[in-house]
Amino acid sequence: MFKTTVENLLEKALEERSDLFLIELSVGDDYGVKVVIDGDKGVTVEDCIFVSRAIEHNLDREAQDFSLVVTSAGAASPLVIPRQFKKNIGRVLNVKTADSAVEGSLVAATDQAITLAWKAREPKPVGKGKHTVNKEANIAYENIVEAKVMIKF
């Protein structure tokens, strides 16, 4: 019942702010609520405060004691839902699948898969030496074990 109430309050807050979206919601046995959000243009402290207040101000602490943490998906956190991939088009990702790892530029993201592009050095088809070739891979979300944005300084 408590979790359902929290889910409904969170859903209402995210409907009001369509630029924000849910990554994770967990409610522990001790009524510890953890909400992880992301946004199409990132997440500010004010965004976290907005979501926190939308939940906290509509629950009765006298009826149920709880703790609430609202946080953003960190820069080093893996991407987990298609909307996160879509907002990161043009950035370099490191994507691990069950049998390989690829680092490349995210050139497209649909609701089913992503497309990565990168350059690789390969042996020339004729003669000695190597040449640079453009590579591209379509990877379905179900085949991604982990995907992270590569932070460049």
Image (tube, rainbow, N blue to C red):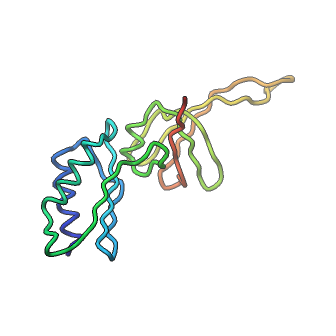
Above or below residue 19? Residue 14 is below
The percent coordinates of residue 30 (x first, y second) are 32, 75
The percent coordinates of residue 77 (x first, y second) are 47, 48
Q: Quadrant of the C terminus?
A: top right
The percent coordinates of residue 31 (x first, y second) are 29, 72
Above or below residue 141? Residue 125 is above
The percent coordinates of residue 59 (x first, y second) are 15, 66
Q: Residue at x 21, y 57 (%)?
A: 10
Q: Quadrant of the N terminus?
A: bottom left
Q: Residue at x 28, y 66 (%)?
A: 67
Given residues 35 and 125, the one toward you in this image is 35
Q: Is residue 89 left or right of residue 17?
A: right
Q: Is residue 44 left or right of residue 15?
A: right
Q: Residue at x 30, y 40 (%)?
A: 44
Above or below residue 6? Residue 83 is above
Above or below residue 54? Residue 135 is above
Q: Quadrant of residue 53?
A: bottom left
